[in-house]
Amino acid sequence: MNPTKILLLLFLVATVLPASSLRADEIKLKSGQTLNGRITYEAADIVKIEIPISASIKETKIIGRADIETIVKDAPDDVEFNKIQKLVPTASMVNVDAYRKMLETGPDAFLKNFPDSKHLPKVREIRATLADELDKVERGFMKLEGDWLSPQDKVAYKELVESKIRLLRMESNVKGNNYNNFIAAMREFEVIEENFSGSPAFPKAIELAKQVVPALGRQLQSMAAAVDYQNAEYEKAMAGSTPESRLQLTAAREREDRNYADSVAADKKAGIKWVQFNPRNKQGIEEALRLAATELGRIQAYDTAALTKQAALLVEADKLIAAEKIAEAKTKIAEAADIVGQSPGTTPSKSKSTSKGKGNAKAGSYLAILNGKISDHLAEEQAKVKAKEAASESEALTANLRKKEEEVKANETPEETGKPAPEEGGSGEKTKEGEMKEGEENVEKPVVDEFAALGATTKGTSKKTGEKEKETPKKPKSKSKKAPADEGTGEDEDGEVVKKPRPAAVVEEEGLPFWVIPGGITLLAVIGIAVMKILGIGGKKSAD
């Protein structure tokens, strides 16, 4: 069970007891023995005291007055204060709910029930400590072996955190002091050795395993010696029981044996070394005993002093990597790898060693993990450099393209741009006074048709000389209708209305140009002769 849960359970059991059971009385005997518990009865010749054996088991002893030297009875607030004092320092990995429960049933309850106690200042101090730690846990911090780890630390130093948690579980299981707990403790050691060798938790786990394995071996020897006798006694009990009881007991035992077999098979399939075993199966006990003997010799070969020194260097390297001081981190890793005391019997990884001849990092070890962190960091930096280079190339390419576009635009001719070339000396259309209109395009003047000029009228001009009519709205396309010639529009081959150059209008007040007169006279003479021929005027006379 998790140590935090055990602590919380014991605390809750103590706090829910009736007020009379909270008193801790002390009886000191003349023999020198001291009994602590609750005095339940006093008489002239005897005293009865109830001594707690466990949270649920109590033993009552009767003591003669002649054997008692002194009796000391604690006040209720003293009893409660002694319990509250045990709350700090708090254990590792206590969660939010456990902190809140400790505050509620501990300091808060004390301050409410004993407002005049002499212990109030110390209780308030303990309450402030618990409230401060609760605030940290609510913000994502974690307490491990007295150290507070921030949320960022839990990510940056994930391997250190997990190895410490494994070590705490191992220590908690050892306190159970029976073969099941010892097996669970060695399973945690197996994980630490396989995945976190080189971490500070590793040498500590080794020292603990050196104590656990011999204790487990002694229990296994006792179990192996007694298993045959216990099985024989069981068979005798079965023979003397009723048929119905025999069926029930047989079914229950078969169910237990099947569960043990399934657990062993699952452990072996998962590659777990310290498998569970059936305590009624002598073969399983003997296999566990042989494993304990083999592992004890292997574990004792570790040099924990060297491993402790190595772990300290690797922790420094881990911090340097987090600070992005890669060169210094590599130096620390090389120093750590050179330390004698690597795991005996392990096969070095295929990756290159960080030192010559020593310190080959086993896959999954803390040293190998740090090398992986460095590789990841270098790969990330290289990716950043490549990304920067790619961005620079892209920017240069974009700049070159823009430059070329500007050069092309600067060298384009009017025909390429689709705009008419400006006239010499300026651009835009000239006004009556010969000045160019600002912002207007320079349109080439149309050629004047003399015959069109002769028949020109004031149509197409406003009443005022030189003022153009307003353009009429465009009408839907139609092939049958032609736009007036003086509107300057016409149709192309597809029936589309297009603008055409207008002939220059002749202003009546100015008269005809002199060079038009001879042509006009000749044209009129030709027309007159043609008419006369048609009418028969001026022909040859008849014979009459």
Image (spheres, helix red, strand yellow):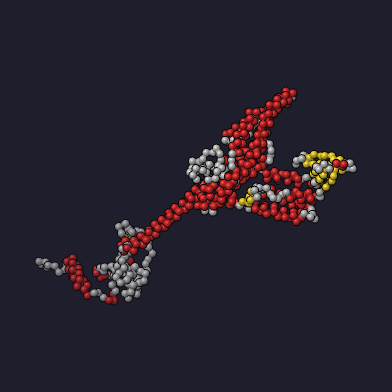
> Residue 250: where, in percent of width, then height?
69, 26
Which image quarter: residue 193?
Answer: top right
Q: Is residue 141 left or right of residue 527?
A: right
Q: Is residue 255 left or right of residue 35?
A: left
- Which quadrant is home to the C terminus? bottom left
Which of 13 and 211 lies nearest the eye of the viewer? 211
- Which quadrant is home to the N terminus? top right
Q: Residue at x 71, y 44 (%)?
A: 9
Which of 312 and 250 lies nearest the eye of the viewer? 312
Most extreme residue toward the right, as rendered?
44
> Residue 61: where, in percent of width, then height?
82, 39
Compared with residue 524, is residue 64 higher up or lower down, i.e. above or below? above
Which of 414 and 123 lies nearest the eye of the viewer? 123
In the rendered image, is residue 23 in sight? yes
What is the count of numbered marks?
0
In the rendered image, is residue 199 in sight? no
Which of 541 and 152 lies nearest the eye of the viewer? 152
Q: Residue at x 33, y 72 (%)?
A: 436
